Image (cartoon, grey):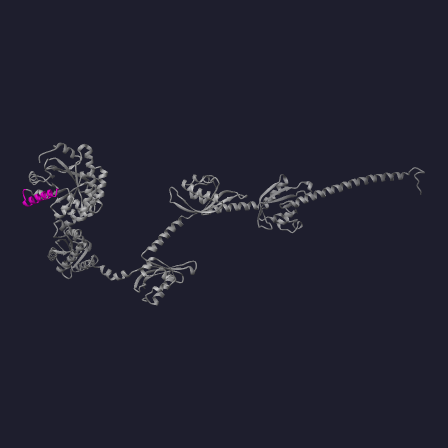
Amino acid sequence: MNFDPELSGPPPDMVALQRAYEDLRLYQAELEVQNEELISAKAATESALARYSALFHTLPMPALVLDRQGLVRDANRSAVSHFGFKSVESMNHHSVYRLLAVRDDARLKQALSEAAEGAPRVVKDLGLRTAERGNQPSDAHVIALPVEYHLDHHHLVLLVDRSLERSGERERLIFQSVLDNSNALIYAFDREGRCILANQALLEGVGKPRKSVVGQRREYWLPVEDAVAHARNDRMVLLGNRAVTYEETLNPPDAPKRHFISHKFPLRDGRGKVFGVAGITTDITETRQLELRLQLAMQVLSRGSEGIIITDHANRIISVNKAFEAITGYSEAEVLGKNPSVLSSGRQNDSFYAQLWDDLLTKGRWEGELWNRRKDGVVYPQWASISRISGDTEESSNFVSVFSDVTHRKMAEEEIERLAFYDILTGSPNRYLLRDRVDQAIRVGTRERGHFALCFLDLDHFKEVNDVYGHDAGDEVLIEVTKRLKQVLRAQDTVSRLGGDEFVVLLTNMEQLGVQQCVQKMLSSLTDPYTAAGITLHLSASLGVAMFPDDGRNYQDLLKSADTAMYQAKASGRNGFSFFSPEMAQKAERRVTIEAALRDAIANGELRVVYQPKVSLATGSVIGTEALLRWQSPLLGAVSPDVFIPIAEECGLITPIGSWVLAQALAQTSAWAQAGLGWLPVSVNVSSAQFWKQDFPAVVERLLKESGVQPAVLELELTERLALKHPDQGVDIMRRLKGLGVCLSIDDFGTGYSSLSYLSRLPVDTLKIDQSFVAALGQDPASEVIVRSIVQLAHTLSIDTVAEGVEQPLHLQYLRDYGCDSAQGYHFARPLEAAALPEWLRERPASVPT
C-alpha cells in the first residue's frame, strides 16, 4: 500500500517509528560522545602508561613491581640488566626472594606488609644476588602503588646500590688498618705545621694520645730542638715542591737517642695545589747500632792479631785482613782469587784435607791444627777455625777461616809441660809437684805410721835486695839458695820454691831430732856470703817446721802450721827456726781476728789520734807535736800500735789508715789555730806503703788545701830504711814534698844501715834520734858515742835533731851537752788527747827549764 504523507496525515505507526528514530539518533549521538570520551580517555590512559613506562624504564636504579606474594609483575631495564635476565618477560613472575643473596626474606616481607598499611619503608643493606657481584649491598625502598594505577596490592621496589659506599668505607678501614699496623711512623702536616694525620706507631713513639697530637704543632709533643729540626725539613719539601729523604733524630729526655729515615713528600688537592706535607718515617736506631757494631767488628777483624781468610762458594779467596799479611807474608793482592791451598806446606796428606772438607760440609765448621808455608818458604803451625756461611743459594755461600800462628806455642809446649811441675827460675819442684809428693808422703806415713817434716822457709829482708840491687841480683840469690839447700839435704828430700823468697822443704821419713839437725844445716848454709851483680850480700832465713801427723794430717794443714811457725821464728828475731805448737795457732788466730777488726776500725770510729808535745831544749818552749795513732777496739780492747801497725802493713790497710791519720792531724791543727793556739807544727809518720804505692805528694797537697793548713806547719816523718829503700826515686819524691813547703824528718835514725853519701842527698830538715839510744845514755858508752855523733853529723849538714823517749833528767843533761835541739817523751808529757792539749799548754809556762 502506498503511503503519501502530503495527502493524508501520518499514520500512527510512522509517528512511533520517527520517534524511535529520533531516540536512536540521540542515543547514537550519545554513543558517539561516549565513544569520543572513551577514545580520549584511552588516549589519556595510553599517554599516562607511556609516561609511566618511560619513567619506570628510565630510572637509573633497578625498579620492580611486586604483587603481594613477592612475584615480579614488572621490572625496568636497569633491573633486568642488574639481575642478569634477558628481558622483562623472562623476569616476570620470578620470586623476588630468589634474588636475595642473603636470606633476608623476613625483613623484606615485613617491609612489604608495612608499606601496604602506610608510609614507604626502607630495608637497609639488603643483600642481592646480581649478575656482576655475588653479594651486593643495596637499600630497598618499598612503596605501595595507589589504586589509580589499577595495581591493587602491588608495590614498587626501588633498589639503591650501596656497594660503592660500602667499598669506600671498607677502603677507609683498610687504609686506617694499614696505617695503624705499620711499624713506620706515618703522618701529615698542613702548611701551618699542624698535624692532620698520625698513625698508631707515631702516637706510641711519642707517647701521646691522638687528641694531643692531631691538630697540634710538633713542639707540643716533641722536644723543642727535635720539633724545630723536623719542621725545617718540612719547609724544605714545601719550598722544593718535591719529595725528599732525610735522616732525623729524636732525643727523648728520659730515653736514649733514636735515629730515623724520613721520606717526605708534598700533598696536593684536586687542583694540584700543595696544602701540606706527608711523611713515612722508619726507625733505624737498631740499624745504626748494628752498623756501629759492624764497623767495630771490622776494625777488630782488620786490626786483630788473628789472620782471617774469606772465600767464595768455589773456595776462591775474596778477602784477607792485615794479620793474614803479617803472618803469611802474602799481600791481599797476591792471593785474591786463588785457592787457600797455595799456602799448604804438603806436611798434611790428602786424607787429612778430605776429612776437613767432610766436616766442613756436613757440620758447617772445622777446627784444628794446620801446617802451612809462609811466602818466604818457612813452614809453620797455625790453629785454624773454618766455618761455612750459607747464603740463599749455593753460589752465595762463603767460607771464613780464622787462624793464629802457634809457632811459639808449639815451641813452648815442652817447656810449658816442664813448668807445670817445676819452678822456672830455680828448676826446683813447684807447688803442684810439692803437693803430689806431700800427699804421697802422707799415704806412706799413714800406712807405716811414720813421721816426716814440712818446713816453710822465708829469707829475711830479701825484698830489700830486689829494691836496692834489682831483681836480677835477687834472682841470682834465689838460685844460689836452692843450690845450697839441695847440697845439705838427702836425694829423697824435696826443695820447692812457692814464689818470691818462700821455699818449702819436705823431709821424708824423719823424726823430730833428725829434722832439727837438718834445719840447722840449712840455716847455716844460707848465712854464708852471696855474690850477686858483682856485690857481696849477707842474708839469713827464718824457718818454721810442722811434723806429720802431730801438726796436720793433710797438705793444707801441714803447710798452714809450718807457715805459722815460720812467722813465730821471724817474730823471735829472724835467722832461726821454730817448731809448730798449738800456742802459735792461737797467735795466728788472734792475728786474723785483729786484721778482721782493723778493717772496720775507721768506719766504726775506733781509731783516734793523740798528740805528744815536742820541746826545745834551749828555751823549754813547745815547738810542735807528733801525731800518734791509737786503737780502742770494742772486741779486743786497747790494741798496741806495735801489734796492729805491722798487721796493717802486711794486709794493705796501712795506706788508707795513714791517709786518715794525716787528714785528722791537719784538721786538728787547723782547729787549734782557730781556737787561738796559733799554728802549732805537727809531725806525722809515713809508712812505706803510703810513700811508694800512691802519688803521695799529690795526696799531701790535696789534704793541705782541704784543711787550710800552711805546708810549713806539717812535718812528715820517714824511716831511715824507707828513705834509702830506692835512693834515687826516694829523693825525687822527697824533693816534690819539699817543693810543697812541708818539712821532712828521718825517724829512728841510727837503727838502719845509713849511708852518709845518701844522707847528704836527702832533703830533710830533722833527724830523730831513736829512743833506744836515748834510754841508754849514762849507762852505755857506745850509745853516748852514737848520740853525740848523730848530733854532730846533723849539725854539719845543717839539720836539726830531736831525741825521742826522753824520760829522765839525766837524759836531758846528756842531750843538752851534745847540743841536741829538741826532745819529746814522758819527761815532758805523755801523748795527749786533742781536747786536753790546749789546757796542758795553758797550764805550762811559755818557757820552762828542762
* Residue in the foreground of this view, choosing between 474 and 512: 474
Rendered view: 151 above or below 338: above
The answer to whether 833 is drawn above or below residue 102 in the figure is: above
Q: Which contiguous range is marked in magenta?
A: 778-798
Q: Residue furthest right?
A: 7
Q: Toward the viewer: 363 or 677?
A: 677
x then y, percent, for residue 263: 46, 47
Q: Nearer the viewer, residue 3 or 51?
A: 51
Provide residue 76's location: percent of width, then percent of height: 65, 47
The number of numbered discs placed on residues in the rendered structure image is: 0
Q: Position of residue 120 (x, y in %)?
A: 62, 40
> Where is 831 relative to 474, above or below?
above
Q: Is residue 593 visible?
A: no
Tell me: 439 left or right of 187: left
Give coordinates of residue 736: x percent, y percent. 20, 44
Name the quarter where the C terminus is drawn.
Answer: top left
Q: Judge left or right: residue 511 versus residue 262.
A: left
**Magenta span includes 791:** yes
Q: Is residue 145 visible?
A: yes
